[in-house]
Amino acid sequence: MPRDLASLVAPRSIAVVGASPRPGSVGGEVLRNLQACGFEGKIYPVNPKHREIGGLRCFATVSALPASIDLAVLAINRNIVLDAVAECGEKGMRNLIVITAGFKESGEEGARREEKLRGLIARYDLNLVGPNCMGMITSTPQMRMNASFSRWFPSGGQIAFVSQSGSLGETLLECFEEAGLGVSLFVNLGNRAGLTENHFLAHLAEDDDCKAIFLYLESFAEPTEFRAWCERIVREKPIVILKAGRTEAGVAAVASHTGSLASPDAIVDAFLAQSGVLRVNTIEETITALRALERGVLPAGDRVVILTNAGGAGIIAADACERVGIDVPPLDSEIRAELSGFLPPEAGLGNPVDMIATASAADYENGLRATLRAADAAIVIFRPPLVLPDEPEAVADGIVRVADEIRDKPVLVCTLSRAETDVVRRLRAGGIPVYAMPETAVDALRFFHCARDLRREPVRDEKVRAVDLTAAQRVVASAVKAGRTGLFFHEGAEILASYGIPVCRFAYTDTPDDGRGLVSDVGYPVVVKIDSPSLHHRVELGGVVTDVANDGELDAAIAELRCVIDENRLEGARILVQETLAGREMIFGMERDPAFGPVVMFGIGGTFVEALKDVAFAVAPVTVAQATTTVRSIRAFPLLGNFRGQPAVDVEELGQFLSALARLSLDLPQILEVDLNPIIAAGSGLAAVDVLMTLSPEAG
């Protein structure tokens, strides 16, 4: 259940425990920041060494404070933090910011101290930020609070910024201020002993004044909860994340291709995309994306119109659009005729629209209004020439007027200059994102499109195939009872069949006629292989014979593989005969990530999968729509279409299979890994021809 953070984010009274008149002291900086930022509530310094600090009466202890104080900021020696937190709890203060370091980040003793702090948080039901944090800032028309030791106090805006890092957070605040981005809330989470990013996401979900959320994270406190809140929030406002570091992936399992191919960062990418979060990789990308998304207007389609008074810059913008898949369509005759009515004969009326250097403010305004009828967004390039019919600010005012009239279509402006002019300031005041170079403006438009695609409503009434969970559980239980950590092919096939994933036809050669019985149904050639739960890479061992074309070759293959079994002492191994399938080979896989849980994989399969590494991931649960998107995301996806006489692979069916595999991973937690390589798309449909499933040693 979401916590009430209203009095934490916007307190009426604040106690600064550890306040000091000494320059450079953290508690002193917090107190001075609160006084300097214009906080209108009451401030209570706490320090037994002083009677007065900064013109305010100073209290000796927390216990001596008046009742009903909304927030306490602790900047004191780590050895007395726990006592102070307990005092706050006894005093009835529920909102705390613990700036003090020396907790889990400092070693075993600090970790024990933090564990005790968590106990106090639970005992007194505290909303606690930190420890080891910079603090929190609120900058809105209603509340100005700098409860931190940051040197930067944002001028205010509609972006909420939650950061796991204090120093980088302060750096970004400075960058945002220089870029004209308004931050309404800044929270440095620190060690997250109490409140995490998920608590603040829950709070921001109900904040109508927040139009965009930005997070800097190095790890996730609780990924499932994070995903749930993001999926809810992005329907109304975009979430941008700069995710640094890599997940604690532990030792990757080597039995399956999934374990060897799944890079932690690829899993993070998949998780964030499924959560609806727009990931950026650099501070520059962060500023580009937030500048675009701050207004909250997303394009309905992919068409953009480019207006410019510099022809070359318009061409550069159009080329950049083509590289990222943004459509720059030609204008229809009606709009071209309208443009020709007020633009000079020398103007180019295609798209880009080159209005030439003498374009007036009216030309920009009328041209933007006319061309937006045929587009979903506009990039306006305006560099004031030496001679201009109007003041440059008039051009900015005209652009803002059109953007206000047509509020459902984003307008971006490129100035071809990094100077912070009155034109730039007027545009930004009007909610127009401004960029120096055409390519950056196109990058911003790409972020618009990504945010829009992530926001689109998921398919709620998907056709999900029925599963036979009882049958699958029975197979797993039998293997666990036998003390095995792997499954035979027929056991894996039964589990897959329970989830609607077909396998090729097969038979064991337990009697001389078993293999020939299968041949009479499927015909030659067939494949003969060793089946053993302990054998993960049978090809390298010589455990597979392909293209077996007649009875004599079948007998010889069986004899050869029995020798391999004996030589390698593969107890309990059996010999398997399978039909030969020809077609495009794909790989499906599943592994369990320590941070995110079950992760499924899809890619081009066969013997080259580890060399090509053309695979994509999704974190369970996975809807069919998400699974289909995962399938389409691999580089070689065009090869799954009509290709060299082969019919197109059923992408919807691939999505069903991948979604079913994700469901299997949630239903059967005893299964650690699944490797289906390959699944072959043949004329008769899709079928797995190799099945590897490993079980947890602790499953029994």
Image: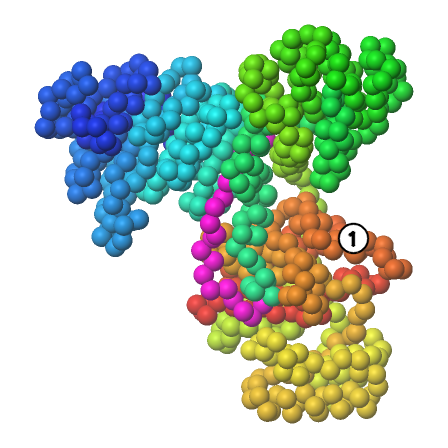
Front-most of 10 and 463?
10
Callout 1 amino acid: Pro
Q: Where on the picture, by quarter, is residue 352?
A: top right
Q: Residues within 10 Å of mark 1 (few under 14, many from 20)?
A: few
Q: Pick the quarter of the image with the N terminus.
A: top left
Q: Can residue 411 be seen in this view?
A: no
Front-most of 553 and 250?
250
Q: Where on the picture, by quarter, is residue 15?
A: top left
Task: Report whether 348 appears left or right of 490.
Answer: right
Q: Where is residue 620 in the image (x, y as percent from the top left)?
A: 57, 51
Q: Position of residue 41 (x, y in %)?
A: 28, 16
* Magenta-drawn stretch contains 258: no
Q: What stretch is highlighted in magenta?
A: 233-256
Numbered circles on residues, count: 1
Task: Report whether 329 appears left or right of 33.
Answer: right
**Colouring scheme applied when the structure was drawn:** rainbow
* Magenta-drawn stretch contains 248: yes
The residue singled out by tag 1 in the image is 638
390 in relation to 611, above or below: above
Q: Which residue is at a point 27% across and 50% down the rendered structure image?
A: 106
Q: Pick the quarter of the image with the C terminus.
A: bottom left
Q: Which residue is at a point 38% across and 17% down the rendered structure image?
A: 143
385 in relation to 391, above or below: below
320 in relation to 679, above or below: above
State the SS at label 1: helix
